[in-house]
Amino acid sequence: MKKLFASILFLSFGLNQVLAQTAVKVEEKLYQPAVLIELFSSEGCGSCPYADQFLKEVIQISDSSKSPVYVIDYHVVIWNRSGWVDPFSDSAYSLRQQEYVHRKNLKALYTPMVFINGSDKDYAGGDKRGIGMAIQSALSKPSKHYLRSRVTGIANEDSLLLAYQAWGNIDSMQLMVAFVQKEINSQVKGGENAGLILHHQNVVKGIYKQEIKNPEGMFKIPVNRDLNLENFRMVLFLQHKRTWDIVAADQVSFGL
């Protein structure tokens, strides 16, 4: 545990000072930054459980400290022919990972792979030091953008209405919403993790996109009426359509 806190510097002592330094500065049109960690993983990948455990710690401490650091986990299909079909995988998430690799001119696609705020640099999911330093660096730089959201009601029995407000230049931006399940325990019966019970956090169950033309608006999110929403949350982020840089993020949880 001590090594974890040493490596994810933003979560160790000094967090309050960092956040205080990056508080909203309306007169300068600079805002408190947010950090989005996108993990691409698979239950068929032998090194992914280590990344899951590390990012679980990030989520737990971030939630308890109410810091603007958000994690989402896309399960990709790349390992589905290696002895185990990941039940949470989706080809759409694989396409998103491939698009990152293409747009950022990266040489390799792998799991567990992490992008932080859509930057040009990728990280191995278990790179505690690298990811921790990247988060600390992002939190220390005031942002030109800010995003806030809330659920305003039920559009019908199968959808939620999400209200959002964005600050900063929204030209060429798109609003992305990831609907994620906070905790999943899964028994794997084949592949590299055969016989293990894996513990996943913030698993993406749907990703939605909307062109943003106004700083305020509504977003309808389809939701299964039988879900227990207390085990789900939504993570929103503004992403540039050309560069794929992520400039702002927010999170909505249901219940306590």
Image (spheres, grey):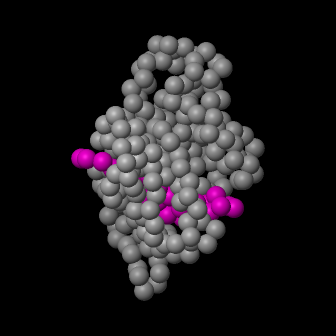
Is residue 203 highlighted in magenta? no
Q: Position of residue 85 (x, y in %)?
A: 57, 21
Closer to the camera in the image, 142 or 220:
220
Farthest left residue in view? 256
**Which residue is depicted at the point 64% across and 45% down?**
96
Residue 11 vertical position relative to residue 84 in the rendered view, above or below: below
Closer to the camera in the image, 18 or 39:
39
Q: Position of residue 22 (x, y in %)?
A: 41, 71
Q: Position of residue 15 (x, y in %)?
A: 35, 60
| Relative horizontal placement of residue 13, taking residue 249 as reference (left or right) | left
Q: Which residues are magenta?
A: 235-256
Residue 33 vertical position relative to residue 116 in the rendered view, above or below: below
| Relative horizontal placement of residue 248, taking residue 99 as reference (left or right) | left
**Which residue is depicted at the point 53% across and 46% down?**
207
Name the magenta segment's main secondary structure.
strand
**Which residue is depicted at the point 66% across and 55% down?**
120
**Which residue is depicted at the point 50% across and 58% down?**
237
| Relative horizontal placement of residue 37, taking residue 100 as reference (left or right) | left
